[in-house]
Amino acid sequence: MTPGNSLPASGRACAPPDEAGMRPARPSGTEEYPLGDDLLVYVPRSETAYALNRSAVAIWRLCDGTRTVEAITKELGQCVGRSGDELLPDVIQGVTRLRELGLLEIS
Amino acid sequence: MRPPPPGVKTAMPPRTIYIAFGSHQVALTSDAPEVLAGVESMYAAMVAPAATRVAGRLEVSRNGGPYDIRGNTVELEDGSLADILRCLRFSVIQVLIQVRPDLLWLHAGAVASGGRAMLLPGEPGRGKSTLASSLCARGWTYLSDEVVPLIPASSRAVPFPLTPAKREFPGQEMPQDWLRAPNKVEVPLAPERLCREPVPVGALVFPSYKVGAPAELSPCPPAHAVVELLRHSWNFASHQGGAVRYLCDLAARVPAVHLSFGDGELAAELLTRSRVMVETNHTLAS
C-alpha cells in the first residue's frame, strides 16, 4: 500500500504495522549544512544534494535506526502538540520520500 | 585570375585566431572565413592578438564542402554554420574548464554594480542574456551571459565576456526546439561596460521567463539556492564535497531570490531599484 492512500474518511491513520514499525536510519557519510530553517544534505556516495525543509529535518534527525516510525511520530507529536494518530500519515509519507531520495535506509 | 571551373572545391588559406581566458588561449584554425568571423564576433572581447600559452586547439575545415570540426574535445562532421558556431562556442568553454579545474564553473550570467556581482544561474531560455543586456544598458558592467567561473577561495566571479546573445521573444510561449534554433541576436557592448577583474559575488538571482508574467522577486531559501547552483555547475566532479561546502558558505552570506518576468526591461528596472546587493553589503559588513 502506498503511504498517503491509507487514510480512511475520518482522516485518522490506519497505517499497516510494517510501516509504523520500520526503523529508518540516516545513511552513514552524509554531510549536513544548516542554512536558515532548512538543511542541505549532501550524499557523497551518490554525489547528490537535497534541501530539506523544517518538517523533513525534524523527521530525518530522529531517524537513527533505533526508533520506529511510530516512536518518531510520538516524539514529534509531543513537540508540536498533536496526537500521534494525526501525524502518522504525514510521518510515513515523509519517511517514504526521504527513503526514495536515498536519505534513509530501513534496518 | 580566372574563377575555378564549376564543381572544383576551393579553399582559403587557413587562419588562426586565439581566444584568451587569463593566461591561457584556445587556438581556432579554419579555412572558412565565415566560421572565423562568427567566432570572433561571439568571443569579441576575448580574442587575443597572439598566443602565449595555448591550452587547446580546434580546427574547422571546409575545403569547398561541408564543415568539418576537429579538436581535443569534439568532432563534428557535416554541420551547418549555425551548428558549427554553437559547437565551437561550447568547445572553447570545455577546453578552458579542463585547463582551470580549480575554478567552479557555473552555467550562469553575471553582471556587476558597486563592486559586487549578481549571478543569474539558469537553463537555456530562462532569460539570462536578456537580463544581462538590459542591466548593462542601465549602467551595470558585464561579466557573462552564459558561463561564470567562480574562485572558491575568495567568492569572486571571473569575467567570461562572451558577446551577449539575446533570444528574440516574439510574445508567445517559447517551444523547446527554439532553445537550439539559431534565433539569437548578438548585443555588442561598449568596452566600458565590460567588467575586467574578478568581482565578489553579492547576490544570486534565479530568473524565469514566462510570457506576460509581471516582474516579481520572491525569496529563495539558501538551501534551495545551493541545490540550484549545484545543478548549474559544469565541473562539479572536480570539486565534489568542496563545491557543496563553498556554495553553502556563499548562500549563507548573500541574498538569493527568484525572479519571474515577461519583459526584460521591466525586470532589469526591478533588479536595479530593488537594490538586492545593497542588502548584501550590509550583510558582509555586519
Image (cartoon, coloured by chain):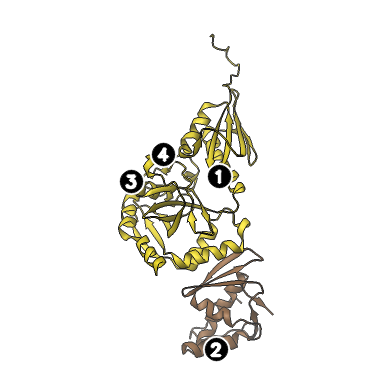
Chain colours: A brown, B yellow
Report x, y in % for residue B162. 47, 42
Whole-percent x, y for residue B20 in the image: 53, 40
Q: Callout 2: residue from which chain?
A: A
Is residue B286 left or right of B4 when viewed as pictured?
Answer: left
Disc 3/disc 2 C-alpha distance (Å)? 56 Å
Q: CA distance from mark 1 to mark 4?
A: 20 Å
Q: How many marks?
A: 4
Residue B106 placed where, x, y %?
Answer: 52, 53
Check disc 1 and report its element: helix, strand or loop. Answer: helix
Q: CA distance from mark 1 to mark 3?
A: 26 Å
Where B13 sits versus B144, above or below? above
Task: State the residue position of label 2.
Answer: A75
Quadrant of res A41? bottom right
Using the image, tell me which numbered label, if any, was put on residue B137.
3
In the rendered image, is residue A60 in sight?
yes
Instruction: Of the two numbered discs 1 and 3 on the same chain, state the one appearing first in sequence.
Output: 1
Subunit ID for the residue under disc 4: B
Q: What residue lies at 64% left-to-right and 79% top-to-bottom?
A: A25
Residue bearing mark 1: B93
Identify which residue, A61 or B178, lies in the foreground.
A61
Mark 1 and mark 4 on one chain: yes
- The reply to whether callout 2 and callout 1 are in contact (CB within 8 Å) is no
Nearer-the-camera pick, B17 or A81: B17
Task: Give the alpha-carbon distance from disc 2 to disc 1, as whole Å.
Answer: 52 Å
Residue at the (60%, 19%) spot, across then down: B9
